[in-house]
Image (cartoon, rainbow, N blue to C red):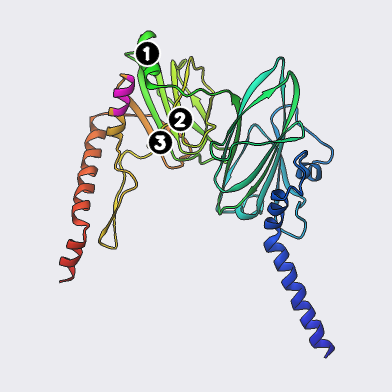
Amino acid sequence: MRQFLLIGFGMLLGLAITAALFFSQDRLISLWQKNALSASESIIGRQLNPAGDVPAQGFKAIYFESAGSNPVPTKTFEETVDTVAINFGPSPLHDIKPRQFGAYWVGRLKFDKPTIKTFTLDASNAYVKVFVDGKAIKIDEKANILSYDFPAGEHYVEVEFLNRSHTVSFKVTIQDEIILDTYENIASFIKMRDLTQAELYYGGIYESNSRNMSTPVHLPHTNKPIVLWLSSYHATEWEITAPRTISAVILSSFMPGSQIKGADVEKIFYIEEYPVYTPVEECACLSGRYFNCETEKTLIDLANYIKANTGLELEGYAMGYNPAGLDILPYNDAIKDSIKELVAKNEQLKKDCSPEMLKQGTE
């Protein structure tokens, strides 16, 4: 009898531990939502960074697994980073699976005078809290953007993050206030600066491939002025290598927060555009009757769109879903011909992919 009681007790204990492991992240999130974790300070920061250490440059990043009976667990890995960003999955990072991944960042900002900065947030499926000087600030969950007035002096920024997806893609950008431009302003700038003979290059991706959400872009050598158009779905830190000062960068991302660095740029224009990251979509006929094509917009369509809105011809391009980097290639007649061939194949596939053709194939 005693043996059966011990076995039963062991089974119950095992179930309890399993339940604690499984529900611990939900427990932490529930505590957040009920404000059991104080909105006036970062409880995660107090536990994982009790000494309040803040690097002189960049951000201290602490990664932890949000699993176990403790709703605020101990840290698994620590490093100093340039930006608040993390991107990986579906494989674990530092032995932490994406769905159990949590992170905490802390850094300092210093201003000689009162300054307005914009916080932008790119988080697909996660719970996020941002603190300034120990007080939580609310970033609009729909626009994922907030303008914040910093008084002169030194300030501390903390970010808490709990992932809820099978992959991790997260970025907080703190930058100068952004004002969206119009194509009329861009065309006017090009005309006023006598850039009608400039080389225009386009770089388009869905998302970054790197852990800090950066993407290198290498521009070819040219003696002409350069206009660079960079577009992505997720916020991206574009690291540009250019042979000379870039006259203008047209920057867009569906999720806010993209930035550029590494090159001298005279003017940055911010616009809202969905990226084109493949020269032509490879369409498919599913189950012999459902034509599937994510987009029928091609690089040729994009080049025409660029010409109509800037007055410039597309001279070079580089694209990919999540490439390690972009090397600009020439946009020429050979590329156009190959695109037209694939478009013709897609059109034929669309005609063949129909219930009528399926019916004929079964007779």
> Which quarter of the picture shows residue 44?
top right
The kind of residue tagged 3 is: Pro
Indicate which disc, 1 or 2, sits on the residue closer to the N terminus: 1
Image: 99 above or below 362: above
Q: Residue at x 77, y 82 (%)?
A: 8
Q: Nearer the viewer, residue 227 or 235?
A: 235
Q: How far apart are marks 2 and 3 (CA)?
A: 8 Å
Q: Residue 275 carries which label?
A: 3
Image: 35 above or below 194: below
Indicate which disc, 2 or 3, sits on the residue closer to the N terminus: 2
Which image quadrant: the C terminus?
A: bottom left
The secondary structure that dominates the magenta segment is: helix
Task: Estimate the x, y position of residue 191 in percent, counting from the top left.
Answer: 35, 11
Q: How far apart are marks 1 and 2 (CA)?
A: 19 Å
The kind of residue tagged 2 is: Ser
Task: Estimate the x, y position of residue 255 in percent, counting from the top left.
Answer: 50, 37
Q: Which mark is residue 188?
A: 1
